[in-house]
Structures are given as C-alpha cells and as structure tokens.
Amino acid sequence: MSGHVLVIGLDDHRPGPVHPEQHIFPEHPDERDYTIVCTDPQRCEGWTACPEPHEFDGISAACGPHSCDCPDGHPNCLGEGPGEGGNRPRPPWFDQEEFDFHGVTHTWRNGWGWTVPYRGCIVAGIDAEWPEQIEQTPIGAWEIDEEWVDESDCYLSFTTAPPTAVDLATVV
C-alpha cells in the first residue's frame, strides 16, 4: 500500500435532478468529488510557512539567518560580526537553520521563510496535480503514489495501470 488513496465520489454540492427526466452523469468529471485519504499519517511529513511574527528580544528575524534585507536606514537585524565596524552583536539565530520561536522549532527555507511542521497529511492538504487518467477512472477508491518535483509541486499517479481499486474499510 502506497500510503494514500484517491476516493472518487459524487459531488455532494451538485444539485440532484430537478425533474424526473433530468439525469445526473456520475462519470462526468465535473459531477464528481475527489478526496485523498491518508492510510499512514505517521509516514506523511511536510512543512508549511509559519504565519506568526518571528522576533527574539524585540529584534525581527524575518530576514532569516544568513542575510539581511532590512530597508535602508534600519540597522542590520543580523548585527555585525568582528571586523565589520559595528557594535551590535549577532542575534542567536544568526547562521542557524533551525531556531525556536514562540515555543516551536522553526526551519529556515529560502523563498519560504521560517517554516514549521505541517499538521496532518501534507498530500491531502495541498493542491496536488491529479493523475492523468482521473477523468476515465470510475467512482471508487484507488491506490495512488505521490512524486514531489520540488518543495511545493506534488504530482499524483495511480500505482498501477489500470488503477488498483482499494477497499477503504481495510485501510482506514
């Protein structure tokens, strides 16, 4: 088992037939709902940008641990090291990839800022690319794999071709 199951069902938000001759076509992708079920939450690890402000002793750590992008006229939030002509000491997060802010360990990621562990299933919580064959796949539960191309792009694929049906009662 891969760890994730794609459940294809009828879209609950789609109105039903208004009159007896109207038909609902569950095979049509626009009339279906897609949900990812995580079968092994301990295996699902991820991170997300932390929305909280990051300060220590009144000094902002928003620029991160390696370089300062403070506006002109503001003192360098990373202080000055020996031989740099200043008298402001380096903050404790200087050159630290991990640091505790507001009681949580954060990891610095370029382009993302200070990040924290993602709570829950990261695959179900992001906007992943669905498998190519999704429109031809019938309603049911299907085993899928995820492939991370980079830190934010996740592509889902069926584990077998044709897709392998899964009995949700045995995995959840």
Image (spheres, helix red, strand yellow):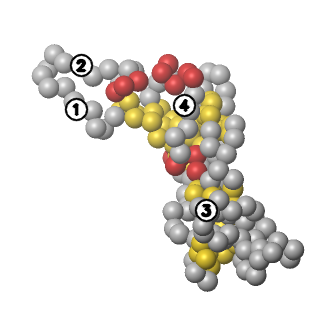
The kind of secondary structure element at disc 4 is loop
Residue 27 visible within the image = yes
Residue drawn at the location 60% of the way across and 72% of the way down: 60
Mark 4 and mark 2 lie on one chain; the one further toward the N terminus is 2
The kind of secondary structure element at disc 1 is loop
Q: Residues within 10 Å of mark 1 (few under 14, many from 20)?
A: few
Q: Disc 1 marks which residue?
A: 15
Q: Residues within 10 Å of mark 3 (few under 14, many from 20)?
A: few
Quadrant in the picture for residue 87: bottom right
Q: CA distance from mark 3 to mark 1?
A: 57 Å
Mark 4 and mark 1 lie on one chain; the one further toward the N terminus is 1
The mark lying in front, picked from 4 and 1, is 4
Side of 78 relative to 40 (left or right): right
Disc 3 residue type (three-letter): Asp
**Residue that sits furthest to the right in the current view:** 83
**Location of the N terminus (image quadrant):** top right
Side of 66 relative to 48 (left or right): right
The kind of secondary structure element at disc 3 is loop
The mark lying in front, picked from 3 and 1, is 3
Q: Compare residues 170 and 74 and report the one nearer the observer.
A: 74
Q: CA distance from mark 4 to mark 3?
A: 45 Å
Q: Disc 2 marks which residue?
A: 23
Residue 129: percent from the left, percent from the top? 56, 33
Q: Disc 3 marks which residue?
A: 72
Residue 2: percent from the left, percent from the top? 67, 42
